[in-house]
Image (tube, rainbow, N blue to C red):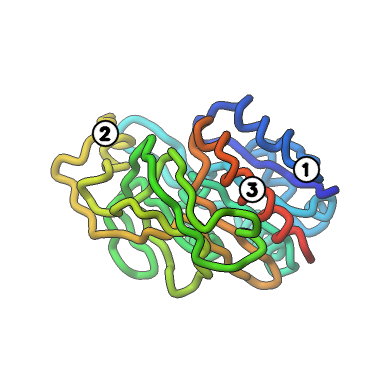
Amino acid sequence: MQEILLVTKGHPYEREPFYAVFDELEHVNWTLVEQPAAQALFNVDEADAYDAFVLYDMPGINFQPGGPEFLEPTPRYRERFLELVASGHGFVFLHHAIAGWPAWDEYAEIIGGRFLYMPGSLRGVQCQDSGYRHEVTHNVSVVADHPVTEGVPSQFSITDELYLYEVFEDDVEPLLVSDHAFVRDNFYSAAAVVRDGKMFDNDGWEHEPGSNLIGWTRTVGKSRIVYLQCGDDPQAYANPCFRQLLGNAIRWVAER
């Protein structure tokens, strides 16, 4: 039986359908801790009670009128988190977790990319804010024979939110690609929502075509990392392929 710490907070979600996914995963016991209380467990000693962390959180952002405030982690938290990664702890990042800690560059490096709520610099390059699109029905192709994709059909359909975001394609091992067109006209501006209060708006917003990667792995220090873009709402939670991927990802990152 694998013990996982499930970390949430920072982005709304439907709790009971989401928790039901973990209740129904075989060989998994889960403990829920919300941010910021969860930060006390991001150190080598406390994390030893868990085989893996599953992050469905979005720390480091204070949403407020006129635009979000981006907060840096404390030096102590940053140091302990990096020690945990170096030690070989397993992490699964889900969906909006890729937007977490926008003022901390190393966090994006750990995950392998970033969703930008506001225009900003990433790896020394000025980037436009990212895009989002809810309830997209799209086809996903498995592009790697990997323990995370074991038992998943080579192609499957899912209805979920997609992101037009920044992916460090050269530094990740691709697992899943979408057939959706990741271009400006198919997405809405994140900044228009959080800065201007305009949902589903892309007037005057420009964005270069983006990556169709929606799932990948990487190893940082001794830690196995998985990112799955899937997992916005109950439609996605109920998808059997998403559940298979999540269960596989937990098992794979938990191996020390």
Asked if marks 3 and 2 touch (Cβ < 8 Å), the reply is no
Q: Earlier in the sequence, mark 2 or mark 1?
A: 1
**Residue 6, image x, y percentages:** 69, 42
Please identify the residue farthest to the left as the structure is shown: 204
> Could you say which disc has been placed on residue 35 in the image?
none
**Residue 113, image x, y percentages:** 45, 61
Asked if marks 3 and 1 touch (Cβ < 8 Å), the reply is no
- State the CA–CA distance, disc 2 to disc 1: 38 Å
- The picture quadrant where one finds residue 24 is top right
**Residue 167, image x, y percentages:** 41, 62
Q: Earlier in the sequence, mark 3 or mark 2?
A: 2
Q: Nearer the viewer, residue 225 or 144?
A: 144
Q: Which residue in the protein does label 2 denote? A: 200
Residue 52 sits above or below residue 17 on the image? below
Q: Which residue in the protein does label 3 denote? A: 244
- State the CA–CA distance, disc 3 to disc 1: 10 Å
Q: Which residue in the protein does label 1 denote? A: 26
- The amino acid marked with disc number 1 is Glu
Within 10 Å of the Cα at label 2, are there few (<14), some (14-19), or many (20+) other Cα atoms?
some
Residue 166 sits above or below residue 58 on the image? below
- The amino acid marked with disc number 2 is Phe
Determine the secondary structure under disc 1: loop
Choose mark 3 or mark 2, whichever is in front: 3
Determine the secondary structure under disc 2: loop
